[in-house]
Image (spheres, rainbow, N blue to C red):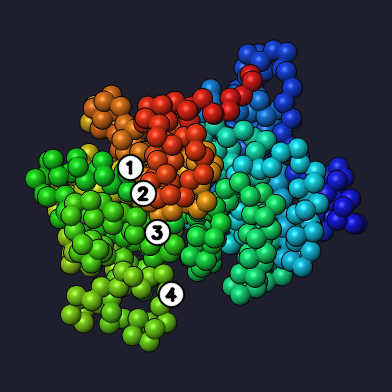
């Protein structure tokens, strides 16, 4: 089949849906709904009749494609109930089973076999559009949430992120473009699966992936010069390489390294202040142990360093407030892989030089050695924060800060109920995936969800509104500060670490305004109209520019 047919034609039936080529995504149509209230009620009734979250996810996916106004109205109506279905955690299972639940194309599927023709394919695709995309979310499926290499199934996460861009950030759905770069997979289950719709070949080497990525970034940025490109769920080495290479060249950011970093910085600002108010410990004296040494862990630790810099520490002093543990134990200068320089480059920044030749292999060993005030999990190991460790954190601290952040729930290091139980309710808790509120010792306790969806819609929207040439580190940190300042007195008195989800549109507008201001300060903005505006006016401007479903 000719590329032109694929691009212009009606999506091909499932037999060989992509042939490793590009398929035109079904675009969001908008048409008046005769009975919106009844439609919404019908959709809810249908969802209620389904027990299984994956079936609910599949039904919602079909509605998104056939009636986006209804879909996004449903998300707006009850984001607390809907987000776990269209996003983390259910989206993880949808990515794992992508080829089995596939009913039609949802975005751009670009195959590495077409590398040489990528500009031609993307040009043909662009020619079919009535407007250029505002936000592109792109993954290669190599590290989906904490679930590993899911190949072409990664499309599910690009779609899931863009659902939140629309519902939470107010981006027009017609301005969103989900992309998966199919570079093969090293997941043997997928390679053996007759229903797998991606390329059946081992995953491309990093050098091959880099060259494909260079072409992709260059072509997309040339064809769509105002588009923001969000990198999602690339495996650590690729994630860092691409961020370093493209950050100052294109309008892009990495959601796992930078988005998660910003959200956790904001949550830590709130938690550390609460903990220090109880214990009297100076803020600069907090100590943070990380379980995990991947891109998210290193990205989060680096972003959290801003907390200590704001408290007046030097970069070196701030860095020394962090201890990172990977699969081999605490990352120390005397570890064999460090001595022989076999350690992954991105981990080097946090090597500890002060352990006097001693090695600390387990989490318990490190907790005993460091006596931390905060414990962060980005290890993708379910239940890794075991009872003795959590109890010890509660012995060491009046209000232990414990953030088990691995996604989805099946990879989370600590369940909310156990965290409350094992710390006698003292814990300051945030997880990456949602947990329902719990009545503990007669009091309603809400689990904070430290998920990057609290900032990425605002980062993308702000960069877009500012016409920013690049997404700078300063803009990322500004998103964290704006998020932490978006709390209402009511949320503060309920001891929350983040604003409530039902205010997400307002929160995203504030995050976007913070990002615009930072872009202006750093001289990377191009939207003159927004310069010199007061904070309130800028926030209002962001709110007024948000898209709303017609239902
Ligand atoms: O998608 C999410 O829920 C958060 C995230 O970026 C990840 O876990 O990779
Ligand atoms: Mg991610």
Would you say the residues marked 1 and 2 are in contact, meaning their CB atoms lie under 8 Å apart? Answer: yes
Which residue position is annotated with label 1? 481
Which residue position is annotated with label 3? 299
| Residues packed near mark 1 inside 10 Å, few (<14), some (14 to 19) or many (20 plus) | many
Would you say the residues marked 4 and 1 are in contact, meaning their CB atoms lie under 8 Å apart? Answer: no
Tell me which label, 4 or 1, sits earlier in the chain: 4
Left or right: where 146 falls relative to 120: left
Q: What whole-number distance in Å separates the C-alpha atoms at marks 3 and 1?
A: 17 Å
| Residues packed near mark 3 inside 10 Å, few (<14), some (14 to 19) or many (20 plus) | many
Tell me which label, 3 or 4, sits earlier in the chain: 3
Figure check: 58 above or below 255: above
Q: Secondary structure at mark 3?
A: helix
Q: What whole-number distance in Å separates the C-alpha atoms at marks 4 and 1?
A: 30 Å
Residue at x-position 38% and y-position 62% = 298
Q: Quadrant of residue 473?
A: bottom left
Figure check: 530 above or below 211: above
Q: Secondary structure at mark 4?
A: loop
Which residue position is annotated with label 2? 477
């Amino acid at each position: 089949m000719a590329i032109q047919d694929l691009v212009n034609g009606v999506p091909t039936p499932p037999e060989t849906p992509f042939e490793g080529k590009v398929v035109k995504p079904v675009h969001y149509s908008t048409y008046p709904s005769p009975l919106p209230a009844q439609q919404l009620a019908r959709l809810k009734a249908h969802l209620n009749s389904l027990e299984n979250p994956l079936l609910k996810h599949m039904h919602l996916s079909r509605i998104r494609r056939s009636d986006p106004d209804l879909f996004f109205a449903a998300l707006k109506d009850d984001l607390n109930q809907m987000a776990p279905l269209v996003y983390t955690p259910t989206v993880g299972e949808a990515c794992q089973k992508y080829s089995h639940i596939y009913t039609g194309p949802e975005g751009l599927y670009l195959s590495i076999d077409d590398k040489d023709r990528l500009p031609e394919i993307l040009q043909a695709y662009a020619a079919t559009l009535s407007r250029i995309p505002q936000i592109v979310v792109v993954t290669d499926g190599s590290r989906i949430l904490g679930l590993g290499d899911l190949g072409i199934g990664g499309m599910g996460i690009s779609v899931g992120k863009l659902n939140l861009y629309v519902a939470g950030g107010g981006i027009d759905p017609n301005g969103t473009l989900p992309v998966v770069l199919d570079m093969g997979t090293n997941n043997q289950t997928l390679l053996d699966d007759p229903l797998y719709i991606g390329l059946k070949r081992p995953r491309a080497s990093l050098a091959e992936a880099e060259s494909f990525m260079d072409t992709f970034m260059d072509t997309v940025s040339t064809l769509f010069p105002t588009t923001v490109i969000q990198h999602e769920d690339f495996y650590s080495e690729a994630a860092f390489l691409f961020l370093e290479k493209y950050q100052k060249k294109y309008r892009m950011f990495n959601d796992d390294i930078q988005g998660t970093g910003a959200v956790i910085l904001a949550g830590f600002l709130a938690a550390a202040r609460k903990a220090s108010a109880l214990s009297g410990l100076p803020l600069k004296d907090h100590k943070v142990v990380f379980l995990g040494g991947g891109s998210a862990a290193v990205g989060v630790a680096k972003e959290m360093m801003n907390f200590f810099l704001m408290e007046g520490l030097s970069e070196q002093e701030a860095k020394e407030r962090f201890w990172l543990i990977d699969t081999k134990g605490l990352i120390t200068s005397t570890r064999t892989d460090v001595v022989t320089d076999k350690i992954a480059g991105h981990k080097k920044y946090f090597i500890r030089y002060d352990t006097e030749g001693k090695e600390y292999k387990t989490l318990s060993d490190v907790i005993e050695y460091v006596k931390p005030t905060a414990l962060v999990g980005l290890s993708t190991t379910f239940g890794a924060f075991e009872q003795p460790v959590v109890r010890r954190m509660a012995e060491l601290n009046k209000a232990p800060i414990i953030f088990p952040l691995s996604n989805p729930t099946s990879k989370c290091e600590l369940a909310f109920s156990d965290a409350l139980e094992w710390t006698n309710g003292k814990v300051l808790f945030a997880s990456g995936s949602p947990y329902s509120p719990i009545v503990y010792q007669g009091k309603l306790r809400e689990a904070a969800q430290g998920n990057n969806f609290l900032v990425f819609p605002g980062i993308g929207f702000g960069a877009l509104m500012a016409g920013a040439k690049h997404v700078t580190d300063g803009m990322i940190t500004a998103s964290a500060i704006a998020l932490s300042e978006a709390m209402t007195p009511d949320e503060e008195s309920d001891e929350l670490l983040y604003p409530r989800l039902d205010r997400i549109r307002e929160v995203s507008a504030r995050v976007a305004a913070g990002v615009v201001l930072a872009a202006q300060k750093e001289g990377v903005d191009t939207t003159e109209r927004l310069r010199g505006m007061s904070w309130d006016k800028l926030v209002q401007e962001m709110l007024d520019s948000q898209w709303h479903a017609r239902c």
